[in-house]
Image (spheres, rainbow, N blue to C red):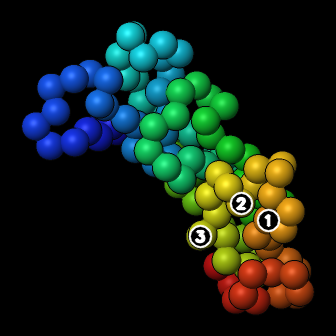
Amino acid sequence: DSLSPPFSDELSDCLCRPGHYNSHESPTEGVACTACPPDTFRALPGGVGLGACLQCPLFSHTNGANGSATCGCQAGYFGNVTLYSEQDVLPTTTTPQTCAANGTNATNGTNA
């Protein structure tokens, strides 16, 4: 579950795929990719430690799947959470994308 640039011969070039994190806390230990737990996600490659997986936003989930790169809206909620990224859920974000019960305040009012 890792990737690296073509012709790379450096261990430090290996990154875990989206939906996974490096369970080795130090880059000198190598790469041991582990799937993010259910209802968490990692949109980008890389990331060290379980904290690299972010909790799905309110009213969204991974449908019980491990290793998710995105979250989807729960049944009865609508929004465009397939576009969620770390920037969308950081505490400093003023208007994160969310799932809404009736499409109000959702990003596009469609079922994700």
Expressed as whole percent of the image width and height from the top left, the position of residue 109 reads: 76, 89
Tell me the tag on residue 43.
none
Q: Which residue is mark 3?
A: 82
Q: Are marks 1 and 2 in contact (CB under 8 Å)?
A: yes
Seen from the viewer's position, the closer of residues 86 and 49 is 86
Name the residue located 67 percent from the left edge and 55 percent from the top edge: 87
Name the residue located 61 percent from the left edge and 35 percent from the top edge: 52
Expressed as whole percent of the image width and height from the top left, the position of residue 8 reads: 16, 33
Q: Earlier in the sequence, mark 1 or mark 3?
A: 3
C-alpha gap between disc 1 and disc 3: 13 Å
Q: Which residue is mark 2?
A: 88
Disc 3 crowd rating (10 Å Cα; few below 14, some 14-19, many 20+) is some
Task: Label 1, secondary structure: give it.
Answer: loop
Type of residue at label 1?
Pro
Relative height, residue 50 to residue 88 (above, below): above
Q: Is 23 positioned to the left or the right of 17 in the image?
A: right
